[in-house]
Every structure is written in structure tokens, then in C-alpha cells.
Image (cartoon, rainbow, N blue to C red):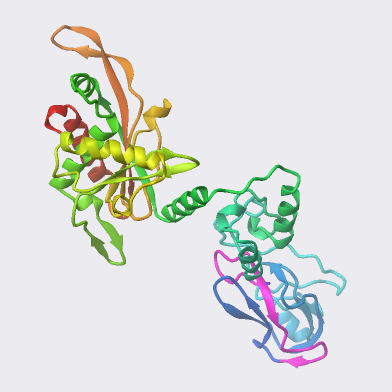
Amino acid sequence: MPQLGESIAEATIVNLPFKVGDEVEADQDVIEVETNKATLGVTTPCRGKIIEFLVEPQQSYPVGYVLGYLEVSEEDAVRVGANGGTVVETNADTQGYDAPSSRTILPTIHGLPVPAHLGGGGYISPRMKARMNELGLQAADLAGVAGSGAGGRVTIEDLEGFLSRLDEHKQTSASPMRIAVADAMRRSWTRPLATVGRPVLLDMLLNHRRKQTIKPGPTLYAVRALAIALSETSAPAGRLIGGKIVHPKAVDVGFAVEAEDGVLVPVLRNAGAAPMAELLPRYDELVELARQRRLPPSAQGGSIATVTNFGTFGLTWATPIPLPEQTLLLGLGAGKVMPSWDKEKEAFVPVTEAGLTLAFDHRVLDGGAAGRLLARVAELLQSPEKL
């Protein structure tokens, strides 16, 4: 089996147009194979007679596998580099043997992006795809399957063995919410995502919150700060579609709310236009509706960014993943009391510091622009009375 592309580790036999005993010419397609990219032909290295096929239709074979044998003249054998042998393989990377009984071959895996025998390879043959479609499986479901094929690919035998072993474990059905979250994250991860972060002081925010009769959560402060920053320049929130960047009509910002067996993202419309005092009632209402999983359609989707407060779980740092339709996700970590040098007092004083992160689609935004946007958000959080 020849190497039919850099990322191709196996191919499926789809047709054997000749039979044993047939005479064939040089460079003639004697076997048709199918990869996950195209249907191709395996050609003869020289003219000769087919004396044996070692493969069967609809079966997959790795790169380097011996597909069959030709009987050729000694002159042709020498010309194609068979070292005077009388048997050569029908392989684009032709190798010769001293005797017809020598049938072993080392896989000719060159140019693959992973080394041979690496577990959990991502190469999927048409036969594997058909089986996965039958079972309702995604490529990500095979991440935990150790591949025994060439280039670490997962074979049908690996998959069936993995599935049979699953029956030994306790299994529960994934909820529709869990499946929806999994699908969204799978689609998000098809993009090159990156995360930048910096510390932010929360003392001013916490002092402002203490003075309020109805106390807004830290998430709402972050939503408002991000909305103002994006109102000043919405370019970082644009989505790359083909060769164009599509910019949002309004600064609608979502925020993550943990619900039963998943996360919902209610959306505050025009969050960049209304002050925080006006947003607070709607924010509290949406939090409660999300927890009850009763969000109205008007409060779902269409936001240009999301804010998540992972600090509520005691986390100081995280790299959350933006939704598939968004470019940005702002994260706020848990506040910790830290020593900070006060120049006027010439002494260390306690301050409350948290990690502020920004995950972004690197196709749309570079690190510098992401860093400047994050710095602006941190600056706005130092003036909570203006939010």
C-alpha cells in the first residue's frame, strides 16, 4: 500500500479489476483504493503477470502492507530496483525480495504528522466512518482509543474491542443538555483558540458593591466593563466568515449560568448602552430563569461575547472556550488577598486581586489586541461607579 498523502495511514480496497493470471502493463491501475479524501489507483511498477492478491474488497490496509505479487522478467526486476529478484510487490514504494517466500515488510510511513505506534491516532478510513455513523459516534469519541494501526490509526478491530470493553463499566445516558454542550464545544474547538490573562484589583468593585441596596454580582460588573470596552471598538468581536470579518450590529453580551447538567448563556441586549443599575433587574431575572431552564428565545443567542465567573468555584485561573458563534470569552477568577507595595506608605498593604482572562479566536485577534482589550476591561473595573 503506497503513501497516498501526508495524513493518510490506510486505505480501503474498493475494486480488483484484474484476476490472478492476467497480464498487465507498466503503470497500470491493478487495484482501486479509497481514502478519506479520494479514490485512487495502485499501479504496477512494470509489466508482468499477477500471481497473487493478498487483499480483499471492502477491507482496510495500512500503508506499507503487501497487496499482491507480480511475476516479471529479470530485466524489469533489476530496472525497478528489485536487486535481481523474481518477485516484486504492487507497491509504489517497490521493494524486492531474494525469494518468493519472503513476505514481511516494514510499513513505509513517511511524512505523517505523528510517529508510528502513537496511541489514539486520528486517521479514519471510510469503513471506520461508516461504522461510526452507524453508532452515532464522533471523531472525538475515539480520543481514548489506543490505535494499533500504522501511524497510530484506530482500526475497526480497535474500535470494536473498545466498545466491547465498555460493557464492563457502568453507563448512563447523556442528557440532551450535556450532548448540546458537547456539540458546541466540539464545533468551537475547530478554531485556533488562545487565552491571555492579567491580574485585576477588586477592592474598588467590592467597596462599591457593599454600598448598594441590591448588590450586583461580580459577573455583572465584568459584563458591563466588557460591553463598554467593545462599544468603544467592536472590531475584536468580529467573526471571520470566509474572507470577510462580520461585525456585530449591537453589543449584546452573554454570561454563563450553571444549570442542571450543563451551562446556559442568557444574553443582556445592548449591554453597552444601558448603565448597570438598569441592567441589574434583568440580569437577576435571567439568572433565575436560566437555573430553571426557562430562558425565553429573546434572551438566547446572538451575543458577541460571553462572561464567565469561574471564581465562584474557587478557581483562580482557567481557559474557558468561547461559543462557536463568538470570538471572545472573558473570565473572572476568585479574589485573593495579596500584599501590594504602597509607594506613599512605603509599606506592603493587603489588596484583593483576581485573575482576568480573555479567550479568543486567534484568526480574528492577535495577542496584542487581546491584551489591550483586557487592559481596558481591567481599567474600567477600577471605576465601578461609572459602570
Q: Residue at x 61, y 69 (%)?
A: 3
Residue 318, image x, y percentages? 40, 34
Left or right: residue 144 compared with residue 256: right
157 w.r.t. 40: above or below: above
Does the magenta run of residues contain 20?
Answer: yes
Foreground residue among 105 and 209: 209
In the image, what residue occupies the spot 59% across and 72% down?
4
Task: From the viewer's side, name the closer residue of 328 and 21.
Answer: 328
Residue 327 in percent (x, y) is at 31, 51
The residue that appears at 26% across and 43% down in the rendered structure is 370
For residue 330, say whether it is visible.
Answer: no
Most prominent secondary structure in the magenta stretch? loop
Q: Which residues are magenta?
A: 2-24
Residue 338 as seen in the image, left or right of residue 248: right
User: On the rendered structure, is 286 left or right of 85?
Assistant: left
Asked where in the image residue 268 lies, by quadrant, the reply is top left
- Residue 119 sits inside the magenta stretch: no
Q: Nearer the viewer, residue 187 or 102?
A: 187
Q: Quadrant of the N terminus?
A: bottom right
Whether residue 386 is visible to the viewer of this picture, yes or no, is yes
- Drawn side of residue 99 relative to residue 336, left or right: right
Q: Which quarter of the picture shows residue 208?
A: top left
> Measured from the top left, where is residue 188 in percent x and y?
41, 53
Q: Looking at the image, is 76 positioned above or below residue 252?
A: below
